[in-house]
Image: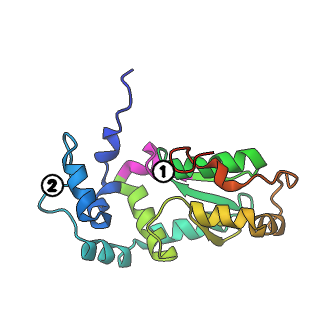
Amino acid sequence: MLPDTGERYLSTTLFDEVIGEMNDVEVEISQSTPRYRFDVSSAPTKADASAKIAAAKPEAIEFVETVTRDAQQPVVMFALEWCEFCWSVRKMFGEVGIPFRSIDLDSVEYQKNNKGGDIRNALKQLTSSPTIPQIYVGDEHIGGCTETFDAFNDGRLQTLLAENNVKFDAAKRPDAYTFLPTWLHPR
């Protein structure tokens, strides 16, 4: 088995809008990488990315609304398999015993017909946020990693979990920010 170099992520349409979210310095850095793909003249602009948000597919919006209303799995995280912020939230949920459903938008299941990209556009439209992860509890949008950590640290997340009958270890109260990667948040 060959090592995962991450190239498969650059080949999925899920990341077609990345150029629209990059500043000039980030584009220059990406172009210094061998086989970069942000040099294509047809790359979308920020205006194009905004237009795509408004054009989220109804079936993708319906999917998000359906999974976030599931009383059997009230904690839902829309994530990317390789995202360190997603893994930080996963680690915190694991430490505290919070059961959750992870919808990994870049997984094989969601790559077919760009389903992951469509769901991400729907999330952008519904939440007004382009970041991943996006966490919901009982049909209430919590936000991304930072908002989820803030909600945990100030107790709002625990209250919402209790209101939705989600069992977790309430005695555990770590500082959520300690779950961030050490390069970002040295311990």
Viewer-proximal residue among 154 and 137: 154
Q: Which residue is mark 1?
A: 80
Give coordinates of residue 142: x percent, y percent: 63, 69
Residue 70 is drawn in which quadrant? bottom right
Viewer-proximal residue among 68 and 153: 153
Q: Amino acid at mark 2?
A: Asp
Q: Amino acid at mark 1?
A: Leu
The segment highlighted magenta reads 103-112
Q: Residue at x 69, y 55 (%)?
A: 176
Residue 110 counted in the magenta span: yes
33 vs 128: above or below: above
Determine the secondary structure under disc 1: loop
Give coordinates of residue 92: x percent, y percent: 69, 49
Please state if 21 lies on the left or on the right of 94 as rendered: left
Q: How is the image coloured?
A: rainbow
Q: Which residue is mark 2?
A: 39
Determine the secondary structure under disc 2: loop
Q: Residue at x 37, y 79 (%)?
A: 54
Residue 36 counted in the magenta span: no
Residue at the left extreme of this rendering: 41
Residue 13 is drawn in which quadrant? bottom left
Please state if 139 lies on the left or on the right of 9 as rendered: right
Give coordinates of residue 143: x percent, y percent: 58, 68
In whole angstroms, how far apart are the C-alphas of marks 1 and 2? 24 Å
Could you tell which of marks 1 and 2 lies nearer the N-terminus?
2
Name the mark nearer the viewer: 1 or 2. 2
10 Å crowding of disc 1: few (<14), some (14-19), many (20+): some
10 Å crowding of disc 2: few (<14), some (14-19), many (20+): few
Identify the image quadrant of the C terminus: top right
